[in-house]
Image (tube, rainbow, N blue to C red):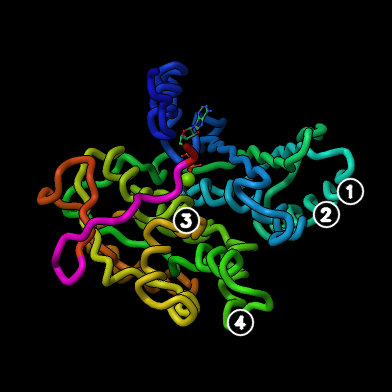
Amino acid sequence: MTELPGEFELIARLAALFGTPPDGLGIGDDAATWPASGDTVQVATTDMLIEGIHFRLDWTNPEDLGWKALAVNLSDLAAMGATPGRALVSIAVDAACRGLVLEVARGLQSLAEQTGTRVVGGDTVRSPGPLAINVALVGEADPAHLLRRDAARPGDLVAVTGRLGASSAALALLSERPTPLDPAAAPLLAAHHRPLPRLAAGQLLAAHGVRCAIDISDGLASEALHLARASGVGIEIDVDHLPLAPAAVRLLGERRSRELALTGGEDYELLFTLDRRLVDELASGLVIEGGLTVIGEVTDRVPVGTVRFVEASHPIELAREGYVAF
Ligand code: ADP
Ligand code: MG
């Protein structure tokens, strides 16, 4: 029996099937681009959340779910340095649960209002069981200041915005611990249920000359690998430098929090590479908790298309690389 393709292989085959557009980015980055009128490009992305895979309704209320469904898409626009635009929202729901649709929509609309996003359509269909929500989002960017996955260069530093591991620490606590949760978990739950897409950070990076970024949806390790492969470079990351969420360290310990930061996912921070001369000006411009942290470098010492993790200057192996669909 021939083996079924994994997620990365499947997307590579889809990219070969659909081909590359002549006038912008197609499959392979956080979002696609094509020329718009004037001096800008349109930037488009879509992401879907499925009950039982991406969320459970006993841990997530419908309004938070709506917020998150838009947030994960806005995060992809942030990773391009783009500003949001307009969204289409599709929901598949069991007939008996259709009352949830408006609650989901209310949560989504509250983030839409905060980010200047306008919902202009969608689709509502019946599901045989699980709730599914898909958002398609179009925004805009300056093509000369686009953040791409394939623009890392040897000599660049590697950095992240904010803190890592909070969302997956919340998930670990929800699944392992009896309720009620320790009040110290509040910031972790907030990061998990209402992630804040780094739109302003993405635009700031782009405006200051950063060229390469990806959002951290599936864990730092797998996103770093995407950058290394797309850019054709080697990346070294010092795990001692990871900006771990303090509440995660407090409740789960440093080692576990580090593992969650590397492979847990759903942080929706930005991973990017930059010329070392930009660090100071970017650090002072980023007004988010955790700011910017340099965690490694793009280097010829690491084989092209791979990521080396070091701890106290020694290479370490990760148990797994991050969330993959298959
Ligand atoms: P992200 O995690 O940033 O949302 P993904 O890993 O889901 O990105 O997708 C990687 C790339 O593959 C993106 O450019 C996305 O648009 C594309 N892609 C994923 N699934 C499909 C599909 N079924 N058809 C076409 N393109 C797809
Ligand atoms: Mg992405």
Q: How far, Cα to Cα, is label 2 from label 1?
A: 7 Å
Tell me, yes or no, whether the two marked residues, 2 and 1, touch with CB atoms within 8 Å: yes
Residue beneath label 4, please? 182
Q: Position of residue 307 (x, y in %)?
A: 24, 50
Residue beneath label 2, please? 103
Residue beneath label 3, please? 265
Q: With 313 as the anchor, is 138 left or right in this view?
A: right
Q: What kind of residue is marked 4?
A: Asp
Tell me, yes or no, whether the two marked residues, 2 and 4, touch with CB atoms within 8 Å: no
Q: Position of residue 96 (x, y in %)?
A: 89, 43
- Nearest-to-viewer mark from 1 and 4: 4
Q: What kind of residue is marked 3?
A: Gly
Q: What kind of residue is marked 1?
A: Gly
Q: Mark 4 falls on what kind of element?
A: loop
* Residue 109 against residue 293 in the figure, above or below: above
Q: Position of residue 166 (x, y in %)?
A: 50, 68
Q: Which residues are magenta?
A: 311-324
Quadrant in which residue 276 is drawn: bottom left
Q: How far, Cα to Cα, is label 2 from label 4?
A: 27 Å
